[in-house]
Amino acid sequence: MTEELQMIYDEFKASNTKSLVHLDTELIKIRAGKATPAMLNGVMVDYYGTPTAIQQVANISTMDARTITVQPWEKSMLNEIAKGIINSNLGFAPQNNGEILIISVPLLTEERRKDLVKKAKAEAEFAKVAVRNNRKESIDMIKDLKNDGLSEDMAKDAENEIQTITNQFIKKIEELVEVKDKEIMTI
């Protein structure tokens, strides 16, 4: 039975790690005023009729703390990439100079910073809900094992272990968001 419990713990940790990775990915997309190529993650471009990630059709880099450059591998893709960036609702207006796209990242207002902090906290809440759902599934699996002959004490210990792991992941989520909040609010 302890092998099954270990499998439940491992599965639980793996699911929660995926939730943390997803949260981290979502937090990277929330810009904090400093230009990074990661801001364009998730931007899709129409590449000859196929939606394609922008990273697969262009080089993305930063010239300075407020400017992102996008250099397509095919010049014919400049307009499609610009259209993809505009349609992504990131609030960027790329400038096309015939060779590359230049994106100026505007400074954030205090109000916009507060909105971004709210967005970051909302993403953290989604991650916490995912962790709690994973906890419920794991505890249900432990209850199934209990019905199959797992002792009462072992089931209780297993549920306590799941709760301990849950608390660790919730703490990690809060730490990630706290760092992002500071990053957003720092001018």
Image (tube, rainbow, N blue to C red):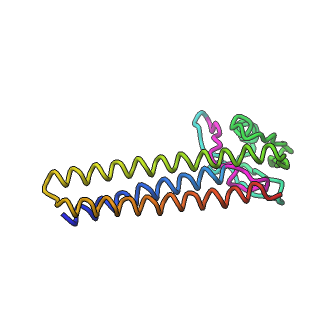
Residue at x 52% of width, y 56% of height: 20
Determine which quarter of the picture holds residue 162: bottom left
Residue at x 68% of width, y 57% of height: 180
52 left or right of 142 in image = right
Give whichever of 75, 113 is nearer the camera: 113
Decide if residue 177 is in sight here. Answer: yes
Residue at x 65% of width, y 39% of height: 45
Q: Residue furthest left?
A: 149
Q: How many marks can you see?
A: 0
Residue 65: % across, % down: 82, 59
Above or below, comparing residue 83 to residue 23 in the picture: above
Decide if residue 102 is in sight here. Answer: no
The magenta stretch spans residue 67: no
The magenta stretch spans residue 46: yes
Image quadrant in which the C terminus is located: bottom right
Q: Over which residues does the magenta segment extend?
A: 30-48
47 left or right of 187 in image = left
Residue 62: % across, % down: 78, 58
166 left or right of 142 in image = right
Image quadrant in which the N terminus is located: bottom left
Above or below, comparing residue 85 to residue 132 in the picture: above
28 left or right of 63 in image = left
Determine which quarter of the picture holds residue 115: top right
Residue at x 70% of width, y 55% of height: 181
Give whichever of 139, 12 is nearer the camera: 139
Residue 126: % across, % down: 53, 45
Give whichever of 46, 132 is nearer the camera: 132
